[in-house]
Image (tube, rainbow, N blue to C red):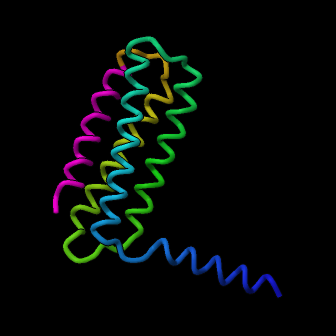
Amino acid sequence: MRRPCVLAASCVLLLAGCGDTSRDELERRAGAVQALAVEGRILADGVVRDRTRSLFVRVHARDLAERAQHEAEKVADATPEPGLETARDRTVAIAGRVAGALSALQTRPGARAGARVVRDRLQEAADQAAEVIARR
């Protein structure tokens, strides 16, 4: 008897994540992407300054990259309210760039020159996410 209830609750939760995306929700998602980019930039800066151990960088960069990719997927799967399609697409693209940059940092966690490039890319992504949030 419990299984139908669990199944019904699961379906409701799954469907709730794929509904319409309001301006406020899109701003929250863009804010999450911005926060991941900033955190990644700080991580990359630690590599540039030789203040962070490679194992920590590898594990943390992987976690941040997975979270950025998850945000991209959530935003891409949602149907935006009319007029928000471009902002949605920009947020998905920014999240994808954040995930890619963090994956590069994960792959070579001790490469200072590469970390410098990643740091700059992540700062640019954070700035772009802030632009999505600022547009009303």
Q: Find out whether residue 116 is within the magenta segment.
A: yes
Q: Find out whether residue 122 is within the magenta segment.
A: yes
Residue at horizontal 30%, vertical 59%?
Answer: 27
Q: In this view, does 111 lie above or below 128?
A: above
Q: In which quarter of the image is residue 91?
A: bottom left
Residue at horizontal 61%, vertical 80%?
Answer: 11
State which quarter of the image contains the C terminus: bottom left
| Residue that sits furthest to the top in the current view | 50
Q: In this view, does 13 lie above or below 114?
A: below
Q: Quadrant of residue 6?
A: bottom right
For this view, does 5 lie left or right of residue 29? right
Total of numbered circles in the picture? 0
Residue at horizontal 24%, vertical 55%?
Answer: 133
In the image, the segment drawn in magenta is 114-136
**Relative image position of residue 128 (x, y in whole percent):** 22, 45
**Relative image position of residue 2 (x, y in whole percent):** 80, 83
Residue at horizontal 44%, vertical 47%?
Answer: 68
Q: Is residue 113 above or below residue 131?
A: above
> Which SS does the magenta portion mostly show?
helix
State which quarter of the image contains the N terminus: bottom right
**Relative image position of residue 3 (x, y in whole percent):** 78, 82
From the viewer's side, name the closer residue of 105 and 3: 3
